[in-house]
């Protein structure tokens, strides 16, 4: 008959694929349960207020039109809904596919059962499959895995959350319009059951049987599967546990399957007492806490409480006298076997000869150890006992008392058992690999000894007092031949014959009085020894390894092991050598991976890699968690080093007098760190945790503090970071790590991650933690609760800088790179601020700050466009005013008659819009000043610290620009293609090195806006009355109450115009030129002796605009040409001289300061 799992057996392969898929689905559900977006829980009041109107449960399906109508009635809700869709559709799709796969799984299983019944598989029926050993295993597993899926979903993904995610997916995806979508069936299967995994939550009625019955399954199939599980040992585990007291442990896997599958036929649990009694007597006579899948534990006393038959059958097991008996028995077993294991683990005890002679004894010790550990771990676990259930609490207290439970002793037994198993397995693996070679060597040695003895009795070889004996000579030669004729492949016959040969050698020594000759006796003894070794060697079977693998299963502790983490860490802290035994424990725990991967591997499923990566990743994460105590201990020492490095030890100067060398040695404060082999990832994790915490705590500012806390806190933070850096550099040789590399990588990751999180506030589609290239599951960057509107320390730093340099309260003097208080005229801050940030956060911090400012500028420009649309384009009065002004100023090259009246009227009619306009322009200008300062600092530090990199980047940039220019002049020349990332990558380097101009950056895409140049022109001349020209300082605010700063105004307008087509800039400059000409013409005609302040302001604006945009000076001459006419300046030489002075203002080196004002 064809093997059931053979590739050409369609029936076996079909059910194997279903079971393989089931294990993969459970792994995916467990993986996804860690990535549930918190917003779907709607636990926070803020989430409820913000998202409550766009996240629906299944009540949505009662009236979808009504719900959608409410959204469409509010544009802001529609916008929020679209943003929510963009941010969550990817993870929602992943969850939906997992939910869909659960439904598809049971549909496929039902179809397989139908095919069996209809005879699709030739000569195979449900009955014949259940008679086959592999067949009955797979059918039982198929139903069991479906039940586990449902339980995992309900435990890990709450019912309300599932409903909200399914409704959101339905609303946001194309599934609602797809004809072949089975979304309705999935919703019916996974609708909320009312179950909650929270402690103390009440169990819903008829749960989980009503949940399990949502998709009908053949009752015959369920009944036959339960029958097989009740009667058979389907995995043949009993052979690995021959002792009757180990029977329930041998059948533990089968018991877990039966527990789950009984919910598909709840009548057995409710009414069939005989069956339940049989089940309890076989599977649960001495245990009531079971592991159903990868460490998910269930207490039968609680789970079977609602079922009469099950509860009655379990009462004997839960009787306090039985509980006491079992606890006492395992206490005695634990004490006995622990002593045995410790004896076996003594140096030199586990030798090859002892192991081979005592295999049954060693295996029995292993069985006793593992059974005791399993029982105690499961029945004393906190997760298995609801503290609100009085009966369960009473049972657990009895166990703790009678078993004399001590978690440290149990943990020590687990460690010793794992080490014992590990050593035995390694010995057996080595012996198996060398088995045939050793056997052949022993055979050869034994045969040669017999040949030599034959030669001795031939009389040819001289040996003391050995007479010639032809009979013995012939006999020994025959024995030698018999030994050589032993066949390794026929181990049974060879074993029997070897025993006979040993007996023959003993008899020949006795009957022929050979004892008198010690040399002959030694030969005979050596030969017998070799023959004994051959018997031992031939008895080394792979079955012993298999038995050890079965007995050593620790999958039930996949989650429970976490309760021992603190004990493990404390043990490592006290004795670092404990890591050796922990290694064996982790390897023992790794055997749990065999359970879900076995069928996936048999089916050659592509899911093997994904599932194994998930479970092994979970195990590695746990190992990292335990071993994290090592870098924590190291960093405790590091903190002392930081104190010494930053406070006690003075740095040695580059030049030092010989007689002062002793003073700088400072032998007292120094001490050594013992070199240890530390885990690099653990060190990184601890470094990240401590640096992130230091940055979070160190960069919190009080906005009411005067003066600002910014500079003192930056200096303090710089000292802290320098202490970390120097101390890390100090210890790197002791622990054999690349300290500087780790420092730079992790600090840059911390800063970039925090910048990314802060920028998320400005993004519509946010970057989640699991999407971030900076966040890591193994070395996570901690997230802290926000203390203000900023999410992270980088946001707080940026907003504090913006606060103290606010153009409403400060005046920026560009020639001095300094901000002054507009009222007190005291210096607020200067360019040294950015050097301090460089010292504190490094290049990554400055670059991150620059990136955050870019996002803020984008947001401000978007707000400006919305304001422009609302206040200007939608206001009819403003539109009419602008239209009238455009008619009055046309053509732009002309001069306006009675210009003061025209301009004043237009400004008066639009006065109400300028406050918001000024606010936006000044904010953008302020942030552009900060970006210029950051760029200068980055460029300076790059040239100073890495001049070759700076030179290479500049030359590469020039070369690329030259090639691009050449391409546009001659399209046949090469140009970077769309898929070429060169331009993108070089831009990142140039920005990090400060080789760029922030004023040339295009921040947003824009459309044509009517009257845009005219509005900006009107805005500018409306601000001139608030400004005055100062010979030493340039253009400044007349009164502090006006809250206006010149350079932010200029750079804000420059940045705004840069976002639009250049013709807007040309028109804007033409309007300014016309304003100057028209105003001067009117002054000339009225013989006013002084140049108007508005004209001075306009001239200064043009000068600064051209300087900062680096436009050619002919642009100014073109817009100003008529002003130089002799007629205009007739009798007004002083005006002309003043204009000449203002036009060359930028080249003047000022000797005055703000204090002279």
Image (spheres, grey):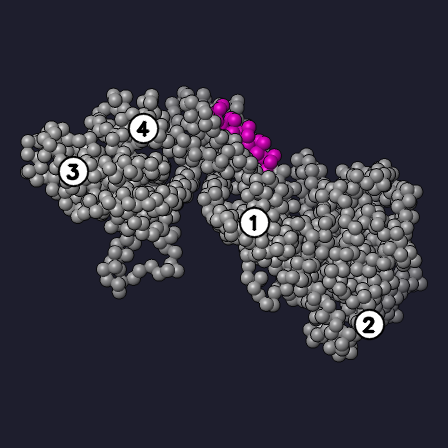
Q: Residue furthest bottom?
A: 122
| Distance from the alpha carbon under mark 3 to that under mark 2 | 107 Å
> Circle 2 — which element?
helix
As displayed, is residue 495 above or below residue 682?
below
How crowded pointer 2 is (Cα within 10 Å; few <14, some 14-19, many 20+) is rated as: some
Label the magenta part by its dominant secondary structure.
helix
Q: Is residue 435 left or right of residue 1123?
A: right
Label 4 neighbourhood size at 10 Å, few (<14), some (14-19), many (20+)? few
To which residue does mark 2 refer? 127
Q: Residue at x 40, y 35 (%)?
A: 838
Residue holding disc 1: 54
Q: Are marks 2 and 4 in contact (CB under 8 Å)?
A: no
Badge 4 or badge 3: first in the primary sequence: 3
Badge nearest the viewer, 2 or 4? 4
Q: Determine whether the residue tagged by mark 3 lies in a helix, strand or loop.
A: loop
Label located before the other in sequence (2 or 4): 2
The residue shown at (68%, 56%) is 190
Query: Is residue 639 among what the camera can see?
Result: yes
For mark 4, give the secondary structure. Answer: helix
* Residue 763 x/y as whole percent: 46, 47
Evaluate whether residue 409 shows in this view.
no
First in sequence: mark 1 vs mark 4: 1
- Number of labels in the image equals 4
Is 339 inside the magenta-drawn segment? no
**Would residue 594 appear left or right of 631 to someone viewing this image?**
right
Callout in the foreground (3, 2): 3
Question: Residue 1042 bears which disc, if any?
Answer: 4
Q: Which mark is residue 898?
A: 3
Q: Quadrant of residue 562?
A: top right
């Amino acid at each position: 008959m064809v093997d059931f799992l053979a590739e050409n057996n369609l029936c076996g392969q079909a059910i194997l694929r279903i079971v393989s898929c089931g294990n993969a689905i459970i792994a995916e559900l467990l993986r996804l349960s860690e990535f549930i977006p918190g917003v779907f829980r709607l636990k926070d009041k803020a989430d409820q207020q913000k998202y409550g109107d766009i996240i629906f449960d299944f009540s949505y399906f009662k009236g979808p039109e009504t719900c959608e109508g409410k959204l469409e009635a509010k544009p802001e809700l529609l916008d929020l809904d679209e943003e929510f869709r963009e941010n969550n559709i990817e993870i929602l799709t992943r969850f939906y596919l997992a939910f869909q796969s659960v439904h598809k799984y049971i549909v496929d299983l039902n179809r397989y059962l139908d095919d069996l019944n209809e005879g699709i598989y030739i000569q195979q029926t449900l009955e014949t499959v259940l008679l086959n050993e592999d067949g009955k295993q797979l059918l039982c597993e198929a139903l069991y895995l479906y039940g586990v899926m449902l339980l995992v979903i309900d435990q890990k993904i709450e019912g309300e959350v599932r409903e909200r995610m399914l409704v959101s997916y339905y609303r946001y995806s194309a599934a609602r319009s797809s004809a072949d979508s089975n979304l309705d069936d999935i919703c019916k299967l996974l609708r909320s059951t009312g179950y909650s995994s929270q402690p103390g939550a009440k169990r819903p009625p008829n749960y989980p049987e009503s949940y399990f019955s949502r998709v009908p399954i053949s009752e015959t199939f369920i009944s036959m599967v339960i029958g097989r599980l009740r009667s058979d040992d389907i995995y043949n585990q009993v052979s690995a546990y021959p002792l009757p007291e180990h029977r329930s442990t041998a059948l533990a896997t089968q018991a877990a399957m039966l527990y789950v599958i009984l919910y598909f036929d709840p009548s057995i649990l409710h009414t069939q007492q005989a069956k339940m009694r049989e089940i309890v007597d076989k599977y649960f006579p001495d245990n009531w806490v079971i592991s159903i899948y990868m460490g998910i534990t269930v207490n039968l006393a609680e789970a079977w409480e609602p079922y009469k038959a099950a509860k009655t059958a379990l009462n004997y097991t839960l009787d306090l006298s039985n509980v006491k008996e079992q606890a006492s028995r395992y206490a005695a077993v634990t004490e006995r076997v622990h002593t045995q294991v410790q004896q076996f683990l003594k140096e030199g005890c586990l030798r090859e000869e002892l192991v081979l002679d005592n295999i049954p004894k060693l295996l029995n010790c292993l069985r006793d150890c593992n059974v005791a550990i399993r029982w105690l771990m499961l029945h004393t676990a906190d997760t298995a006992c609801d503290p609100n259930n009085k009966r369960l609490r009473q049972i657990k207290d009895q166990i703790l008392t009678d078993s004399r439970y001590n978690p440290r002793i149990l943990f020590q037994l687990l460690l010793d058992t794992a080490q014992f198993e590990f050593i035995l397995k390694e010995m057996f693996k080595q012996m198996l690999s060398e088995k045939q070679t050793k056997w052949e060597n022993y055979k050869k040695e034994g045969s040669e000894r017999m040949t030599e003895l034959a030669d001795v009795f031939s009389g040819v070889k001289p040996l003391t007092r050995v007479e010639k004996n032809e009979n013995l000579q012939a006999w020994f030669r025959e024995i030698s031949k018999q030994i050589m004729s032993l066949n390794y492949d026929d181990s049974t016959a060879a074993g029997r014959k070897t025993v006979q040969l040993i007996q023959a050698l003993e008899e020949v020594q006795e009957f022929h009085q050979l004892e008198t000759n010690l040399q002959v006796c030694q030969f005979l003894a050596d030969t017998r020894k070799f023959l004994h070794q051959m018997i031992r060697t031939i008895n080394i079977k792979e079955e012993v390894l298999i038995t050890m693998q079965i007995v050593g299963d620790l999958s039930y502790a996949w989650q429970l092991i976490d309760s021992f983490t603190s004990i493990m860490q404390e043990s490592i802290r006290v004795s670092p050598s404990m890591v050796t035994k922990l290694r064996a424990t982790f390897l023992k725990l790794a055997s749990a991976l065999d359970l879900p991967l076995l069928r996936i591997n048999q089916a050659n499923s592509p899911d093997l890699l994904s599932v194994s990566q998930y479970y092994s990743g979970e195990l590695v994460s746990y190992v990292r968690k335990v071993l994290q105590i090592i870098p924590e201990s190291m960093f405790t020492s590091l903190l002392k080093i930081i104190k010494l490095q930053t406070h006690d030890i003075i740095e040695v100067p580059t030049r030092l007098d010989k007689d002062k060398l002793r003073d700088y040695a400072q032998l007292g404060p120094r001490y050594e760190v013992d070199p240890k082999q530390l885990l690099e990832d653990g060190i990184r994790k601890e470094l990240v945790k401590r640096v992130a915490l230091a940055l979070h705590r160190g960069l919190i500012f009080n906005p009411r503090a005067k003066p600002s806390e910014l500079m003192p806190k930056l200096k303090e933070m710089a000292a802290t970071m320098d202490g970390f850096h120097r101390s890390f550099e100090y210890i790197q040789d002791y622990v054999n790590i690349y300290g500087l590399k780790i420092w730079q990588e992790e600090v840059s990751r911390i800063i970039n991650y925090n910048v990314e999180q802060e920028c998320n506030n400005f993004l519509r589609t946010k970057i989640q933690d699991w999407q971030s290239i900076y966040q890591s599951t193994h070395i996570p960057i901690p997230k802290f609760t926000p203390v203000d509107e900023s999410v992270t320390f980088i946001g707080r730093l940026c907003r504090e800088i913006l606060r103290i340099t606010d153009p409403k309260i400060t005046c920026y003097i560009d020639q001095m790179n300094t901000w002054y208080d507009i009222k007190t005229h005291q210096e607020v801050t200067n360019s040294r601020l950015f050097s301090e940030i460089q010292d504190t956060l490094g290049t990554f911090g400055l670059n991150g700050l620059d990136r955050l400012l870019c996002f803020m500028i984008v947001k401000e420009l978007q707000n400006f466009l919305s304001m422009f649309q609302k206040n200007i384009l939608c206001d009819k009065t403003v539109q009419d005013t602008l239209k009238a002004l455009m008619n009055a100023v046309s053509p732009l090259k002309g001069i306006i008659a009675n210009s003061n009246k025209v301009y004043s009227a237009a400004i008066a009619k639009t006065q109400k819009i300028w406050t918001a306009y000024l606010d936006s322009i000044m904010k953008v200008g302020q942030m552009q000043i900060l970006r210029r300062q950051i760029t200068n600092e980055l460029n300076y530090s790059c040239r100073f610290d890495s001049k070759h990199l700076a030179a290479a980047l500049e030359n590469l940039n020039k070369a690329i620009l030259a090639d691009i220019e050449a391409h546009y002049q001659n399209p046949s020349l090469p140009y970077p293609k769309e898929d070429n990332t060169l331009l993108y990558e070089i831009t990142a380097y140039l920005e990090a090195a400060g080789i760029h101009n922030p004023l040339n950056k295009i921040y947003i895409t824009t459309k044509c806006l009517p009257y845009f140049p005219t509005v900006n022109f009107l805005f500018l001349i409306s601000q001139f009355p608030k400004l005055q020209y100062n010979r030493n300082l340039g253009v400044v605010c007349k009164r502090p109450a006006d809250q206006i700063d010149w350079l932010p105004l200029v750079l804000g307008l420059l940045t705004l115009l840069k976002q639009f087509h250049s013709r807007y800039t040309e028109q804007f400059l033409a309007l300014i030129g016309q304003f100057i000409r028209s105003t001067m013409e009117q002054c000339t005609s009225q013989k006013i002796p002084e140049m108007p302040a508005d004209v001075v302001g306009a001239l200064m604006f043009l000068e600064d605009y051209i300087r900062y945009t680096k436009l050619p000076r002919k642009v100014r001459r073109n817009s100003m040409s008529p002003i130089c006419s002799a007629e205009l300046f007739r009798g007004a030489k002083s005006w002309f001289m003043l204009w000449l002075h203002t036009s060359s203002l930028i080249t003047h080196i000022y000797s005055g300061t703000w204090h002279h004002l």
